[in-house]
Image: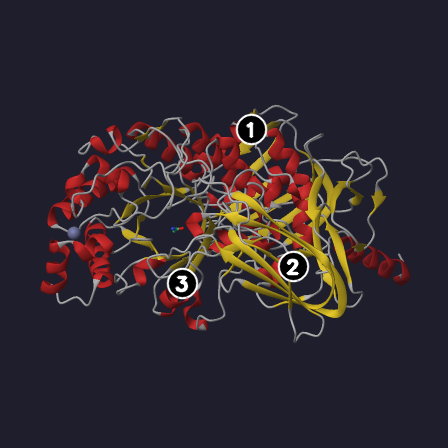
């Protein structure tokens, strides 16, 4: 062979080595692995596999059991080999997954087995659902955080054991490793405690449940459907075994000192007394009925916790600690004496004393407590881990003081909030938390000193159950946002890409469907937004979808899409309209069309001296506070860029006594052509207001008057009620949108 041929051969070999592998590729996997190299070829992963795994290894046994649930395990010729290899130098949960035509599937991980399990999850997502083919790849992956949680609240509305098991199965697919089980609250006690049978005999039942949102000024409306259920110890053991098989730790939450109505309905002797009747609440609120920090109460709670600790192997026991009103303690002779005797400053320090006492007990059993961030108030218990929910501040404070923290700030992590236009969604608690906002979350705040950032041990989604009455609704809230959170928890920030996530999610939906998950399909819908464009001086509509490569079609006031237009860019809207939109890919629609009522008037783009949202085009939904804005000053001043002729004002006022929102009893409109001299063009004493009103009614506000030149319009609203809250806040008017024409 001459020298030329030899160098040619070397060049070819080098090319084979380098041209056949692509580094740092993004895979159709959620959460996105942290390192992936694409190799040459494919592996046919048939329904038949043969597994080689270390013997006498619990973790390997679990993974083999799991695989056996999804494949036929046999040694036949047609079986794809799967090798589980031990590497004692690897960290728990990390895995190396190599899929090559020559060797089949090899997963290398630490002997505890969690890494093999996660390698299997990645493998199953890579496998083509149709033909079982997997592309050759090498994945070197490990999680960003050790606490990757999801929370469930069957205390508010009962959810059966079967839904718990289904949820555990689902969160395991996305490599979550903590299930936060919120077992007790004002509306239900859901765990059997043998020593105190009344906790479930009395505390797990209620005759009815509030309909819609709370209202403290009128009798709440209730359904007549009993809510009842608790998990027996055998149920819990089954749940724990199922979770352990999926490398999930279950953290139980037993709420104290607040959120205690159900427990106190069963054992009122552990309250402050004060002549109250204690009931399992059917209403959703924060209640003044809390545990009284007397010795008998500590004995009761420690006995309860002992049974919980005996049952749950988790290092952490969550003791709640959130939203504990101090009214009862302020009135209770025993509590006041304790504050004095212990030299405490106030009731907040009494709560701190309470939590510290409980922590001592839990620590004495070799376990640690987690509490919501209110446990910072009055001084943090020495070994407590903090779950920061009211924002990141509590977490930042705790981590900066050297405590471990799990970040669950509501703004990014409360997926009981709406994920789509609330007008199109099932009844929710409120808020707005779309999937891209969940995805954008970074639990490690820059406000924590570098050297203490390791105290952020993870994050989780919380799914509070107040408005979630069925398993289907629970899944609707959890999915697909939980998948966005899985990437927050697992994937390094430098590897995260929302665009790739959307492509992977598109491929993952069919699997969620095949698993019978009732996921929200907003991902496949067109979302409709409106805003005034100051440059073009027009009210514009923008349509967006997360569905990759999809087109959007829209119509005005036509749900049949007969004359649908293709959306290419924001378009101007000149009058009130209902915009209808739908996303399509290759002519196919995967979710229902959406619509939004938009109000466009001469006021669009004008300046308003109160909430600018009062002129944003969006109408309010009577059942939700979203889009309704309370105005205290009674006078709303609207200033136009240029004088315009006006002759009418339209709006709606929401009746929501819970927020001190009442309709107006008098509406006056004043108009000025120069912004200086005002003329009263409309003044009506008695706007129609039906008594007794139904909570969440939107009352029309309408004023018509002679055409008048206006630079400034003043809308003066007199609230029909002259009551105040305990803190002196007066009743006022809340509007969704002001239209002036
Ligand atoms: C909470 O959301 N009350 C922790
Ligand atoms: Zn008391």
Marks 2, 1: nearer the viewer: 2
Query: Relative to 578, is 647 above or below?
Result: below
Would residue 676 be visible to someone looking at this image? yes
Q: Quadrant of residue 326?
A: bottom left
| CA–CA distance in space, label 2 to label 1 | 55 Å
Q: Secondary structure at mark 2?
A: helix
Camera-side residue of 112 and 658: 658
For disc 1, the marked residue is 70
Residue 395 — which label?
3
Q: Residue visible at 72% across and 39% down? A: 42
For disc 2, the marked residue is 615
With 409 as the anchor, is 197 left or right in this view? Answer: left
Q: Which badge, 3 or 1, comes first in the chain's sequence?
A: 1
Q: Residue visible at 40% across and 63% down? A: 395
* Residue 166 on image: x %, y %: 48, 32
* Residue 675 on image: x %, y %: 67, 74
Would residue 142 be visible to someone looking at this image? no
Name the quarter where the N terminus is drawn: bottom right
Q: Are marks 2 and 1 in contact (CB under 8 Å)?
A: no
With 578 as the anchor, is 721 left or right in this view? Answer: left
Q: Which badge, 2 or 3, comes first in the chain's sequence?
A: 3
* Residue 245 on image: x %, y %: 43, 35
Marks 2, 3: nearer the viewer: 2
Q: Secondary structure at mark 1?
A: loop
Q: Residues within 10 Å of mark 3 (few under 14, many from 20)?
A: many
* Residue 73 on image: x %, y %: 55, 26
With 114 as the anchor, is 232 left or right in this view? Answer: left
Q: Residues within 10 Å of mark 2 (few under 14, many from 20)?
A: many
Q: How many marks?
A: 3
Name the quarter where the C terminus is drawn: bottom right
């Amino acid at each position: 062979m001459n020298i030329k041929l030899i160098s040619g051969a070397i060049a070819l070999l080098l090319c084979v080595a380098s041209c056949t592998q692509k580094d740092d590729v993004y895979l159709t996997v959620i959460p996105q692995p942290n390192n992936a190299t694409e190799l040459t070829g494919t592996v046919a992963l048939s329904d038949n596999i043969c597994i080689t795994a270390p013997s006498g290894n619990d973790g390997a046994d679990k993974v083999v059991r799991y695989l056996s649930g999804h494949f036929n395990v046999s040694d036949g010729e047609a079986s794809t080999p799967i090798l589980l290899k031990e590497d004692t130098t690897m960290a728990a949960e990390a895995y190396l997954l190599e899929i090559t035509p020559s060797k089949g599937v090899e997963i290398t991980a630490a002997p505890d087995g969690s890494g093999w399990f996660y390698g299997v999850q990645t493998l199953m997502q890579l496998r083509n659902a149709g033909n079982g083919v997997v592309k050759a790849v090498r994945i070197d992956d490990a999680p960003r955080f050790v606490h990757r949680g999801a929370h469930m609240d069957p205390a508010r509305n009962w959810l059966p054991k079967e839904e718990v098991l289904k949820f555990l199965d689902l969160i395991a697919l996305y490599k979550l490793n903590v299930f936060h089980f919120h077992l007790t609250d004002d509306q239900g006690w859901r765990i059997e405690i043998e020593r105190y049978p009344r906790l479930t005999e009395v505390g797990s039942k209620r005759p009815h449940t509030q309909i819609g949102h709370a209202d403290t000024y009128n009798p709440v409306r209730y359904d007549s459907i009993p809510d009842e259920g608790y998990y027996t110890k055998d149920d819990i053991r089954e749940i724990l075994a199922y979770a352990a098989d999926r490398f999930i730790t279950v953290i139980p939450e037993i709420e104290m000192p607040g959120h205690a109505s159900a427990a106190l309905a069963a054992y009122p002797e552990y309250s402050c007394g004060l002549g109250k009747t204690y009931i399992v609440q059917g209403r959703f609120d924060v209640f003044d009925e809390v545990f009284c920090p007397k010795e008998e109460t500590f004995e009761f709670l420690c006995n309860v916790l002992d049974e919980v600790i005996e049952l749950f192997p988790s290092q952490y026991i969550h003791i709640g600690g959130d939203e504990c009103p101090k009214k009862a303690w302020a009135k209770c002779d025993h509590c006041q004496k304790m504050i004095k005797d212990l030299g405490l400053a106030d009731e907040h320090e009494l709560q701190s004393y309470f939590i510290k006492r409980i922590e001592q007990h839990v620590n004495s059993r070799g376990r640690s407590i987690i509490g919501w961030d209110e446990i910072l108030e009055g001084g943090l218990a020495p070994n407590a881990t903090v779950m920061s929910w009211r924002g990141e501040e509590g977490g930042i404070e705790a981590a900066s003081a050297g405590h471990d923290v799990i970040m669950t700030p509501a703004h990014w992590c409360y997926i009981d909030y709406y994920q789509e236009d609330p007008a199109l969604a099932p009844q929710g608690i409120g808020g707005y938390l779309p999937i891209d906002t969940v995805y954008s979350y970074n639990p490690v705040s820059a406000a924590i000193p570098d050297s203490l950032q390791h105290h952020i041990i993870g994050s989780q989604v919380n799914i509070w159950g107040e408005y979630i009455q069925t398993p289907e609704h629970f899944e609707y809230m959890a999915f697909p946002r939980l998948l966005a959170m899985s990437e927050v928890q697992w994937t390094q920030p430098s590897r995260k890409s929302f665009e790739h996530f959307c492509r992977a999610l598109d491929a993952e939906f069919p699997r969620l469907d095949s698993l019978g998950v009732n996921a929200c399909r907003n991902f496949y819908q067109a979302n409709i937004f409106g805003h005034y464009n100051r440059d073009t001086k027009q009210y514009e509509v923008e349509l967006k979808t997360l569905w990759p490569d999809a087109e959007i079609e829209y119509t005005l006031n036509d749900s049949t899409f007969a004359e649908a237009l293709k959306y290419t860019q924001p378009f101007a809207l000149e009058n009130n309209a209902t915009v209808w939109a739908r996303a399509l890919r290759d002519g196919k629609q995967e979710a229902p069309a959406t619509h939004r009522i938009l109000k466009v008037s001469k006021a669009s783009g004008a300046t308003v001296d109160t909430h600018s949202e009062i002129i944003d085009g969006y109408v309010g939904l009577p059942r939700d506070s979203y889009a309704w804005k309370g105005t205290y000053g009674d006078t709303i001043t609207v200033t136009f860029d240029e004088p315009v002729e006006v002759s009418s004002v339209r709006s709606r006022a929401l009746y929501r006594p819970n927020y001190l929102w009442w309709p107006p009893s008098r509406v006056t409109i004043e108009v000025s052509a120069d912004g200086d001299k005002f003329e009263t063009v409309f003044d009506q004493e008695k706007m129609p207001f039906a008594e007794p009103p139904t909570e969440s009614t939107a009352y029309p506000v309408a004023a018509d008057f002679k055409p008048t030149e206006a630079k400034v319009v003043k809308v003066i609203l007199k609230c029909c009620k002259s009551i105040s809250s305990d803190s002196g806040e007066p009743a006022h008017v809340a509007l969704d949108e002001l239209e002036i024409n």
